[in-house]
Image (cartoon, grey):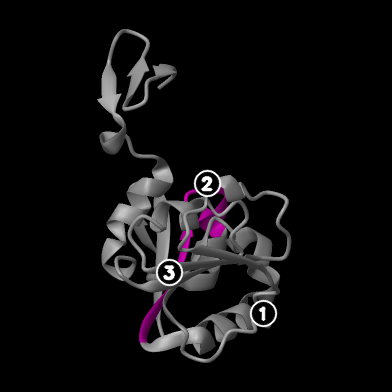
Amino acid sequence: RKWLFARSDTYCAYGGTCVKKEHFMTKTGKIVQELLSDIENKTILEAACGSAEFSIAASAYASEVFAVDLVDFRLHKEKFKSNVHFEIMDISKMTYANESFDTVFIYNAFSHIKDQWKDIERECRRVLKPQGKLYVISSWKIDTSLFEAEFGDKVQHCGDFFIVALKK
């Protein structure tokens, strides 16, 4: 849908359809809503965050959001809320203490990290709290075969997303 203009509280499309901003949801916003029970009032980590799109969407609900990547040139830090913290870090060798996070997310990054997956998975599990979950999520169709090859029957389909939920 192409949006003709955005007023302070409303998005309006060609043809006159208008949607209040609080009802307008991006693709990333939809998956955040789907996984809200593992985000809301939690301390979360987005590993290999890229532009931190997931972190920004989740920051409306999480207590604290930590986002890490090897580089920061894709970030839009002006969109960060005060509860979002970014660090440049290798996610296969994170400096966080053991059991620091309630939930760890890898969002639309698996194809970039697949060659280091075993080291990254071990490190993500290390920083998870005992009842924590590691989510690997993709909305990219190109990742279908990668997800199936690596995760097999653990892959869940949720709308436009492939989701793998791993317990600590």
Determine which residue is flagged by label 3. Answer: 64
- The secondary element bearing badge 1 is classed as loop
List x then y, in percent, for residue 63.
Answer: 37, 68
Marker disc for residue 139:
none
Q: Residue at x 31, y 32 (%)?
A: 21
Q: Residue at x 62, y 55 (%)?
A: 50
Determine which residue is flagged by label 2. Answer: 79
Question: In this view of the protein, which residue sits in the foreground, 96 or 91?
Answer: 96
Residue 34 is inside the magenta segment? no
- Check disc 3: other Cα within 10 Å, few if <14, some if 14-19, many if 20+: many
- The secondary element bearing badge 3 is classed as strand
Determine which residue is flagged by label 1. Answer: 92
Q: Residue at x 44, y 71 (%)?
A: 44
Q: Quadrant of the C terminus?
A: bottom left
Query: Residue lying farthest front?
Result: 82
Residue 38 in sight in this render: yes
* Position of residue 124 in the picture relative to residue 28 (left or right): right
Task: Please identify the quarter of the rendering in which residue 19 is found.
Answer: top left
Mark toward the start of the polypeptide (3 vs 1): 3
Check disc 1 and give the amino acid type: Ser
Range shown magenta: 131-145
Check disc 3 and give the amino acid type: Glu
List x then y, in percent, for residue 126.
Answer: 52, 89
* Position of residue 17 in the picture relative to residue 64 (left or right): left
Check disc 2 and give the amino acid type: Lys
Tell us which disc is closer to us: 3 or 1.
3
What is the count of numbered marks? Answer: 3
Q: Residue at x 29, y 56 (%)?
A: 34
Question: In this view of the protein, which residue sits in the foreground, 79 or 96?
Answer: 79
Mark toward the start of the polypeptide (2 vs 3): 3
For marks 2 and 3, give the CA distance: 15 Å
**Contact check, label 2 and label 3, Cβ < 8 Å:** no
